[in-house]
Amino acid sequence: MEISHTYDHLRYKLKPALQSKQEEFALLGYGQVSEQELWNFLKRKKWRKADENKRISEIVQDILSVKVGEYFNYATVEAFKEADFAFDDEEELRKLLK
């Protein structure tokens, strides 16, 4: 279970900015990004060290400034972390590690 983030209470107010970023990703051909995935990225990467005095306009700017590459680098690393790699064939493992 994930601990609550400093900005979680603002999520409803930030929904239009999150939706705008999702629409931007969709226009660029990356429609599969959910609002929750984007929110998790922001909490874990952009807002790791949350500033309680940060204005909502600055938080919105953080959302709107997310770059596609930045997000997908994060998503790729997370996918590898969550993947269950099981190499039953030692030969396959050796080929992979070459």
Image (spheres, rainbow, N blue to C red):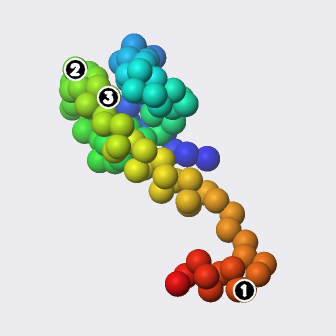
Q: Nearer the viewer, residue 10 or 84?
A: 84
The image quarter in which residue 55 lies: top left
Location of residue 53 with respect to 21 vertically, above or below: below
Residue drawn 61% across the image and 57% down it: 82
Query: Which residue was labeled with disc 1?
Result: 90
Question: Closer to the camera: disc 2 or disc 3?
Answer: 3
Percent coordinates x, y for residue 4 in the rendering: 49, 39
Percent coordinates x, y for residue 93 in the rendering: 65, 81
Element type at mark 1 = helix
| Residue type highlighted by circle 1 | Glu
Residue drawn 55% across the image and 45% down it: 2
Q: Nearer the viewer, residue 34 or 91?
A: 91
Decide if residue 94 is on the left or right side of residue 34: right
Q: Is residue 9 in view from this perspective?
A: no
Location of residue 80 with respect to 60 vertically, above or below: below
Query: Which residue was labeled with disc 3?
Result: 63
The tag earlier along the polypeptide, 2 or 3, is: 2
Location of residue 92 with respect to 1 vertically, above or below: below
Percent coordinates x, y for residue 89 in the rendering: 76, 81
Q: Is residue 70 in view from this perspective?
A: yes
| Residue type highlighted by circle 3 | Ile
Decide if residue 42 is on the left or right side of residue 80: left
Question: Closer to the camera: disc 2 or disc 1?
Answer: 1
The crowd level at tag 3 (other Cα within 10 Å; few <14, some 14-19, many 20+) is many
Location of residue 82 with respect to 44 vertically, above or below: below
Query: Which residue was labeled with disc 2?
Result: 57
Question: Closer to the camera: disc 1 or disc 3?
Answer: 1
Q: CA distance from mark 1 to mark 3?
A: 44 Å
| Residue type highlighted by circle 2 | Ser
Does the residue at mark 2 contact the one at mark 3 (Cβ under 8 Å)?
Answer: no
Percent coordinates x, y for residue 46 in the rendering: 31, 42
